[in-house]
């Protein structure tokens, strides 16, 4: 939700989302994830209260879920927060991006502020545009296999419905064990 904390994941949202994912998995409800996340909420308060441990709960919930998982990246998908939001790296069944999506370690402006801090502001802006074209665009992510396709936003509903039909009988066999070791 970009209007709350600029869309960042914090401790509370990570735990709430992890509970939701586990509940959906328990009742065999498919997961459709719409991603617009610029990262985990920065700050010493979040770090001291355990953002890494609590963010790991969300990562664990998506990784362990055996129900169909369809993800659409609508805008920002940065860093570790992108990974925990049912990315292809967590066994997502179908991952798509809209043409407006930015998939990268961090935003172009932030990266160029670090890389080119000694240069004037107008040069940093020019470098940010180059960075966005080279690293952040969804076409590059599709070429690298991070998303299955770049889709037209107008076709999103149809594609999600088709995928949910395709994966309706999904059978995922995890290794036999008594229970998993969730990061508590």
Image (cartoon, rainbow, N blue to C red):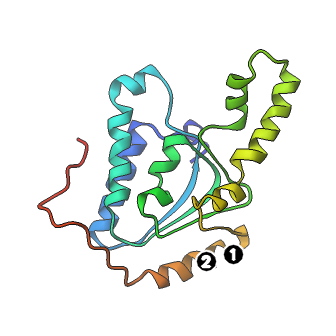
Residue 32 appears at what percent x and percent y? 49, 66
Relative depth, front residue between 119 and 155: 119
Q: In which quadrant will I find the C terminus?
A: top left
| Residue 160 visible from this viewpoint | yes
Above or below residue 105? Residue 181 is below
Residue 137 image position (x, y, % from top left): 72, 52
Q: Which residue is painted at 24% across and 48% down in the image?
A: 182
Q: Position of residue 9 (x, y in %)?
A: 48, 41
Q: Is residue 48 left or right of residue 147?
A: left
Q: Is residue 20 visible?
A: no
SS state under label 1: helix
Q: Residue furthest left?
A: 178
User: Residue shown at 25%/43% (left/top)?
Assistant: 183
CB atoms of marks 2 and 1 within 8 Å: yes
Where residue 51 sits in the image (x, y, percent)? 38, 33
Q: Which mark is residue 115?
A: none
Foreground of the two, 166 or 46: 166
64 or 18: nearer the viewer? 64
Q: Residue at x 48, y 23 (%)?
A: 43
Q: Residue furthest top?
A: 118
Look at 47% across and 53% down and name the residue there.
85
In this picture, residue 85 sits left or right of residue 180: right
Q: Secondary structure at mark 2?
A: helix
The circle on residue 159 is 2
Q: Quadrant of residue 38?
A: top right
Badge 1: residue crowd in 10 Å (few <14, some 14–19, many ≥20)? few
Q: Which residue is mark 1?
A: 155
Number of residues whose C-alpha sits closer than 10 Å to that of mark 2, classed few (under 14), some (14–19) or many (20 or more): some
């Amino acid at each position: 939700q970009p209007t709350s904390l600029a869309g960042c994941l914090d401790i509370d949202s990570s735990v709430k989302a992890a509970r939701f994912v586990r509940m959906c998995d328990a009742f065999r409800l498919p997961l459709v994830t719409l991603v617009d996340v610029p990262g985990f909420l920065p700050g010493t308060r979040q770090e001291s209260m355990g953002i890494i441990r609590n963010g790991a709960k969300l990562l664990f919930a998506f990784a362990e879920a055996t129900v169909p998982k369809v993800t659409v990246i609508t805008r920002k998908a940065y860093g570790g927060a992108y990974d925990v939001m049912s990315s292809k790296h967590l066994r997502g069944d179908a991952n798509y991006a809209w043409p407006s999506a930015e998939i990268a370690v961090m935003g172009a402006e932030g990266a160029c502020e670090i890389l080119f801090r000694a240069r004037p502001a107008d040069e940093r802006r020019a470098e940010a545009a180059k960075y966005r074209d080279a690293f952040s665009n969804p076409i590059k992510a599709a070429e690298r296999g991070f998303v299955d396709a770049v889709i037209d936003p107008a076709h999103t509903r149809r594609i999600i419905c088709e995928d949910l039909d395709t994966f309706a009988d999904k059978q995922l066999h995890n290794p036999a064990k008594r229970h998993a070791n969730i990061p508590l």
